[in-house]
Amino acid sequence: MLVGDAILILGIYSVLFYTEWRLALILFASIPVIGTMVWICHRKTTPRFLEVRKKMAEVTAALTEFLHGMSIIQIFHRGAYARQKVYKANQAKFKDDAYVNIGVVLFFNSVFFLEYVKIGLVLVIGPILGITYGTILMFIIYIWRSYEPLWRTSEQLSTFQKAVAGSKRIFALLSRESKLPLPKKPVKWEKLERAIRFENVSFSYTDNGNWALKDATFEIPVGKRVALVGVTGGGKTTVISLLLRLYDPQKGRITVDGIDIRDIAVEGLRSRLALVLQDIVLFPGNVASNISLESEDISTESIEAASRTVEADRFVRKLADGYATEVTEKGSNFSRGERQLLSFARALAFNPDVLILDEATSSVDPETERTIQSSLRKLMEGRTSLVIAHRLSTILDVDQILVIRRGEIIERGTHTELLLQNGYYSKLFHLQFKNKNGVLANA
């Protein structure tokens, strides 16, 4: 459309110059004026269009948060607060939106006013130059025709500028480079054969020297189960984030079979690791696709075998459509325990060398926890495992327990060894297992 309009305007002015160049030259003088007006309009409105997109994102975010937490809003009688919050975000967006739309309207009305100025000039100057009435009429018709592209553009300008503003935000995000340097010649790592090792690893999320992990050194031998325990904020999740290479440590290094993980392609590293989170994520689709994540390397038989191993098959078979049952938003048609078993089945189906469990049973009730404990043991059987747990009952039989406090490993050993040390782990254990009379149950 733009190309066609450009050819149309070029053709119109060519005919006008050929017919009466003096009058055409006078009319052509308005082109720089229009160009200046376009430049001013662009300078003034484009930043506001970008602000409108940002404010629209804020409105959407506020709505999403309150809709997802609707039950909490209702229970605590905070409906008026939620409405006021969304109203303020919407008003801020409306003000910027009104500003740019009024600006666009004023701009185009000013441009179209020049159309009538041009027609007036033709009617006044034409007879003075001795131009015939037929030529004057032709000029007037061509002036009308030359403004048709502007009418079309005016209808699309608001949409166009919103799209430009939106694309700027998208491309700003896409152009951000990863802070993790990629290896120029990645080392191929196909399977864990010896051990994962943290060597004097220190890491901070900020530049103020507040270490989330400090001088951590430990080893996870192949086939062994290692647990990380400690209070919230001690550095347990940081260990997992570094192992998965979501971040790189500022000091020290992490190796797998003696290879620095920074020398392995990120995809190659993560393909040998599986993570089971406390917050279970289920995606749109059916049960089978949530276990396989639609990977072509995982067959239907592998999906069902993984489900049987972790005992998820028992409840999946009872569903009307079995593995073809559709999963509703956030998996709300399954209980917490069932969603957890599906996440176990997913981890097993990918057949990882290393299994990482991040508080996998912390948010289920004790009865559900007992139900999935056997599945958890089957999942970890013969597999190198790194387990984060607040409930110490889930890690009593692991090969080694690492106790982390304020980013430092302060104790290590088996459950029995740590209890006999009567240190920090022993205090945590006694806090969890003492009953009202101060007696340890099943100590």
Image (tube, grey):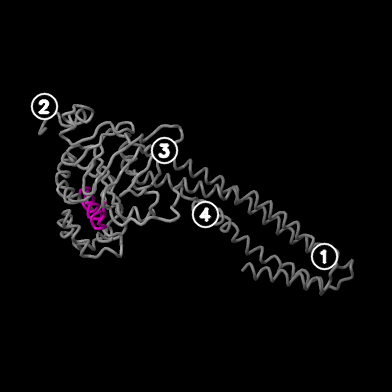
Residue depicted at 31% across the width and 62% down the height: 295
Q: Residue furthest front?
A: 258
Residue matched to label 3: 205
Q: Secondary structure at mark 4?
A: helix
- Residue 410 included in the magenta stretch of the image: no
Q: Quadrant of residue 72?
A: top left
Q: Is residue 421 above or below residue 51?
A: above
Tell me the magenta residue range.
Answer: 335-353
In the image shown, does 184 or 364 lie closer to the viewer?
A: 184
Of labels 3 and 4, earlier in sequence is: 4
Q: Quadrant of residue 62?
A: top left
Residue matched to label 4: 171
Q: Give the quadrant of the N terminus.
A: bottom right
Q: Give the quadrant of the C terminus.
A: top left
Q: Secondary structure at mark 1?
A: helix
Residue matched to label 1: 25
Of labels 3 and 2, earlier in sequence is: 3
